[in-house]
């Protein structure tokens, strides 16, 4: 009987290559944009929600896969022991350096995933009009060129926050309503900031390898000590965005439940300020940061649902 272990190993590699553990972020973003539309204009189409979620998931898969491919091609992830200290949250998937999949096949997965997201976007343009096109263009170009250009131009964190924040939430809102609004833009600010700091913190362990590979992100430019302070400032500003959104009437009062993650955020901020140079001690801080990012966004969505049914 033919040994099934190599085949199973390859199937597992294909499953892990898109970094499925990070895709929950996309679910939270699409859900939030959808419930904001439901709250604001009483619009909810289940089919459009599912299609938008599928499109965004493929867009996210494309980013992860193409980033992994480009990191391998540039040499950032090739010699992990010498150049890079992988953590559960950073350092790449390790699949290409270990030879589990062919680089060309991984690249094709990234391109095909981006194409699927594009064609779903075309469907919504056909349904609602051309106002979705700017989001598609910005998202598509920045997804494809993130590793090759944007991460080397000191704007990687900005575009990560923009794509997996305002653009994703505005897009999910648009496919339900056919329009945009200030309310959904304000609601998208905190998620955008949180996504940016998700990337920022995960860049700390990768800083040396990224610099060798030609990247220029905020941790490299500022240094880890200053970048840790910037992390704290951005974390606080995400909660300020929620507070201001509610205070000025752009978000419902129930959105304040997004503040329930503040104790975890404080733990993460204290941790990064004292352990920014210790990759091993950063791992639980990265875990806390992921929890803040995901739970805050799901809580915001729950807050809108409560506002729909209670007010």
Image (cartoon, rainbow, N blue to C red):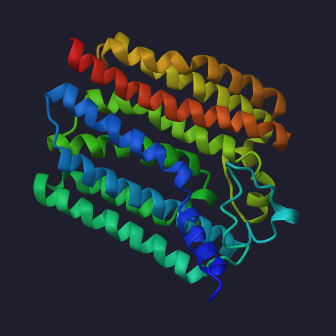
**Position above or below: 4 against 191:** below
Residue situated furthest bottom in the rendering: 1
Q: Residue at x 36, y 45 (%)?
A: 168
Q: Residue at x 55, y 41 (%)?
A: 196
Q: Position of residue 51 (x, y in %)?
A: 25, 54
> Which quarter of the image is occupied by the C terminus?
top left
Q: Examine the rendering and report whether any part of residue 180 can be seen.
A: yes
Left-right relation of 107 to 100: left
Left-right relation of 62 to 83: left
**Position above or below: 308 against 202:** above
Left-right relation of 57 to 193: left
Q: Residue at x 36, y 10 (%)?
A: 247
Q: Quadrant of residue 28?
A: top left
**Position above or below: 224 against 254:** below
> Which quarter of the image is occupied by the N terminus?
bottom right
Q: How many discs mark residues in the rendered view? A: 0
Q: Position of residue 58 (x, y in %)?
A: 40, 61
Q: Residue at x 44, y 31 (%)?
A: 297
Left-right relation of 118 to 269: left
In this orientation, which residue lies closer to the viewer: 232 or 289? 289
Residue situated furthest front in the rendering: 1
In this orientation, which residue lies closer to the viewer: 61 or 188? 61
Q: Position of residue 27 (x, y in %)?
A: 40, 44
Q: Quadrant of residue 285?
A: top right
In this orientation, which residue lies closer to the viewer: 154 or 57? 57
Q: Examine the rendering and report whether any part of residue 250 can be seen.
A: no
């Amino acid at each position: 009987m033919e040994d099934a272990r190599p085949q199973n190993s390859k199937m597992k590699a294909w499953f892990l290559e898109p970094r499925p553990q990070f895709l929950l972020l996309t679910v939270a973003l699409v859900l939030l944009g959808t419930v904001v539309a439901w709250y604001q204009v009483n619009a909810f189409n289940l089919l459009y929600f599912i299609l938008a979620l599928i499109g965004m998931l493929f867009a996210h898969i494309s980013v992860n896969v193409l980033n992994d491919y480009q990191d391998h091609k540039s040499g950032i992830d090739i010699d992990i022991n010498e150049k890079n200290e992988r953590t559960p949250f950073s350092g790449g998937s390790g699949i290409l350096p270990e030879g589990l999949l062919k680089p060309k096949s991984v690249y094709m997965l990234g391109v095909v995933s981006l194409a699927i997201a594009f064609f779903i976007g075309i469907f919504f343009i056909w349904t609602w009009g051309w106002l979705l096109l700017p989001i598609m263009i910005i998202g598509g170009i920045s997804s494809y060129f993130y590793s090759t250009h944007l991460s080397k131009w000191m704007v990687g964190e900005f575009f990560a926050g923009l794509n997996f924040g305002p653009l994703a939430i505005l897009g999910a809102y648009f496919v339900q309503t056919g329009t945009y609004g200030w309310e959904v833009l304000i609601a998208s600010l905190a998620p955008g900031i949180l996504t940016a700091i998700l990337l920022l913190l995960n860049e700390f362990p990768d800083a040396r390898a990224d610099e060798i590979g030609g990247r220029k992100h905020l941790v490299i430019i500022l240094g880890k000590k200053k970048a840790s302070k910037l992390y704290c400032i951005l974390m606080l500003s995400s909660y300020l965005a929620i507070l201001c959104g509610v205070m000025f009437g752009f978000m419902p009062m129930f959105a304040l439940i997004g503040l329930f993650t503040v104790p975890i955020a404080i733990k993460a901020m204290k941790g990064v300020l004292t352990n920014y140079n210790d990759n091993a001690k950063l791992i639980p801080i990265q875990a806390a940061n992921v929890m803040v990012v995901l739970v805050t966004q799901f809580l915001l969505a729950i807050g809108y649902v409560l506002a729909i049914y209670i007010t």
